Image: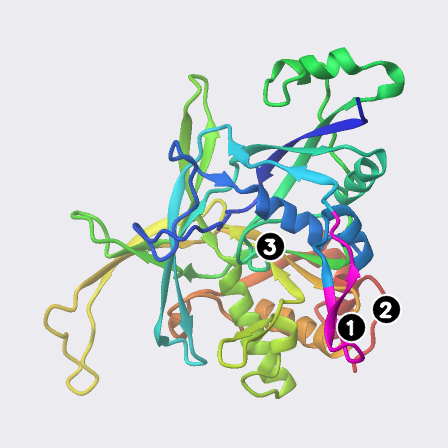
């Protein structure tokens, strides 16, 4: 018998997960399902995330394997092998959903600088809601690989797509079971079934400390007006539009889930307004912040991942109001025929969200980010739709847990100091 280490991973969604399949029966991108019709996180997705956390190319190849490499030799005019095939040291298994969770649809659309929808930019996709719990397994046959995998578990984990825009944040706890040939564990190993709950009952869950290479800024906000981030309804006796909500599942006594719709501002909305305002402040062109906020150019096949993360924020303690209005003809000031529209919006709520940016990001970006948060606080930046009629305004209550009344006098220098933790000067 050889050394064996098994890890049981509990993956808890801290934000919605967008992990699509090739199916588009319900939306443009449906969630991937197993043979029983339940959402599943493929082993390839989990392995890919952990592989991306390796610091060096050598570490990736040694831990996750590599195929034979060939290079063209000018002298012999033939391909020459420069690296041998190397098997992976870690074996990953699909993570299965163990608790009931709701699945919902998010619709998105690209907006131009005037907040009008761009043609052909409508896209609907399924998500798995926050709070879902998955169980997955990892196996290794060397002590070195087991130690390196424990180190990888210290990093923050993001799965699926749009994970820099509030989706796919995952909390990980793990148990481990080790069989050592020097301790004559052969019989125990032969009786061990990794997928059975019984062998794991005597093992406690470990919650590793999380580290990453990001500066995180946490903002607490209070609404100063209504919010118009909508999803549209075609159901009879319902409003034409209602707030975009998170279907937050909470377990109750009989083992079922009670679904509480909570209004949300997705990370994509936060990213859009920050990118637009920072571009204006820095006087950059339309694509000036591509390297910071990320981009995909289908024509040139070039892309870059965002160096800034925006979390999703939930609106708490909000008051819901239903409003009915008419469209007005701008020439006659009369109502347009058939233009009656009913919407549900939310007022007077509070929320929190986080902005994370790489530690080596340039100071111009930090300065523009500071100025944008100041403008958000002062009402010059609004989120969502209908901002021209007073929707989407927020007041910043706290920055990184510092009370406004005690620590911040809302000048550029003090706000930047609260965000980045050191005495700052205007650049």
* Position in image of residue 291 (x %, y %): 65, 76
At a point 57% along the width and 71% down the height, the residue shown is: 274
Q: Is residue 404 above or below residue 255?
A: below
Identified at 67% across, 38% down, the residue is 91
What residue is rendered at 49% in x and 65% in y? 393
Which of the marked residues, 3 or 1, is nearer the chain's N terminus?
Answer: 3
Whole-angstrom CA distance, mark 3 to mark 1, is 22 Å
- First along the sequence among labels 3 and 2: 3
- Say which residue label 2 marks: 423
Give coordinates of residue 157: x percent, y percent: 66, 47
Q: Quadrant of the C terminus?
A: bottom right
Does any portion of residue 56 appear in the rendered image? no
Label 2 secondary element: loop
What segment is highlighted magenta in the picture?
70-86
Pointers 1 and 2 in contact (CB under 8 A)? Answer: yes
* Sequence-wise first label, 1 or 2: 1
Q: Secondary structure at mark 1?
A: helix
Residue at the spot 69% in from the left edge and 71% down from the top edge? 370
> Can you tell which quarter of the image residue 344 is in?
bottom left
Q: Position of residue 85 (x, y in %)?
A: 74, 52
Residue for badge 1: 413
* Neighbourhood count class around disc 3 (C-alpha, 10 Å): few under 14, some 14–19, many 20 upward: some
* Distance Cα–Cα, label 3 vs label 2: 24 Å
Residue denoted by label 3: 353
Q: Is residue 21 visible?
A: yes
């Amino acid at each position: 018998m050889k050394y064996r280490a098994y890890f049981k991973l509990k993956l808890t969604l801290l934000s919605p997960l967008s992990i699509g399949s090739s199916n588009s029966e319900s939306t443009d991108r449906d969630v991937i399902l197993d043979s029983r019709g339940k959402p599943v996180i493929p082993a390839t997705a989990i392995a890919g995330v952990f592989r991306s956390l390796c610091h060096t190319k050598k570490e990736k190849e040694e831990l996750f394997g590599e195929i034979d490499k060939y290079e063209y030799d000018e002298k012999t005019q033939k391909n020459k092998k420069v690296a041998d095939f190397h098997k992976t040291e870690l074996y990953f298994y699909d993570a299965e959903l163990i608790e009931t969770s709701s699945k919902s649809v998010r619709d998105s659309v690209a907006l131009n600088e005037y907040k009008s929808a761009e043609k052909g930019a409508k896209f609907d996709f399924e998500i798995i809601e926050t709070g879902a719990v998955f169980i997955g397994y990892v196996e290794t046959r060397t002590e070195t690989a087991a130690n390196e995998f424990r180190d990888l578990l210290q990093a923050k984990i993001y799965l699926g797509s749009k994970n820099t825009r509030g989706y796919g944040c995952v909390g990980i706890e793990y148990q481990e079971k080790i069989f050592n040939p020097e301790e004559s564990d052969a019989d125990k190993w032969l009786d061990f079934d990794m997928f059975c709950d019984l062998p794991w009952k005597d093992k406690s869950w470990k919650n590793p400390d999380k580290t990453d290479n990001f500066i995180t800024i946490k903002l607490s906000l209070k609404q100063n007006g209504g919010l118009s981030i909508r999803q549209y309804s075609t159901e009879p006796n319902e409003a034409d539009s209602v707030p975009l909500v998170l279907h937050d599942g909470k377990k109750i006594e009989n083992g079922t889930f009670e679904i509480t719709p909570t209004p949300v501002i997705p990370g994509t909305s936060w990213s859009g307004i920050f990118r637009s305002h920072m571009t204006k402040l820095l006087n950059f062109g339309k694509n000036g912040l591509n390297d910071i906020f990320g981009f995909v150019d289908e024509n040139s096949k070039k892309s870059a991942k965002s160096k800034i993360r925006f979390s999703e924020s939930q609106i708490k303690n909000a008051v819901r109001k239903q409003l009915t209005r008419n469209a007005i003809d701008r020439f006659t000031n009369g109502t347009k025929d058939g233009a009656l529209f009913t919407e549900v919006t939310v007022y007077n709520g509070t929320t929190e969200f986080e902005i994370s940016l790489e530690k080596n990001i340039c100071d111009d970006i930090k300065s523009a980010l500071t100025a944008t948060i100041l403008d958000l606080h002062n009402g010059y930046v609004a989120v969502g739709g209908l901002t021209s009629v007073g929707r989407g305004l927020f007041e910043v209550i706290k920055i990184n847990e510092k009370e406004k009344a005690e620590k911040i006098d809302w000048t550029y220098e003090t706000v930047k100091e609260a965000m980045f933790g050191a005495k700052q000067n205007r650049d």
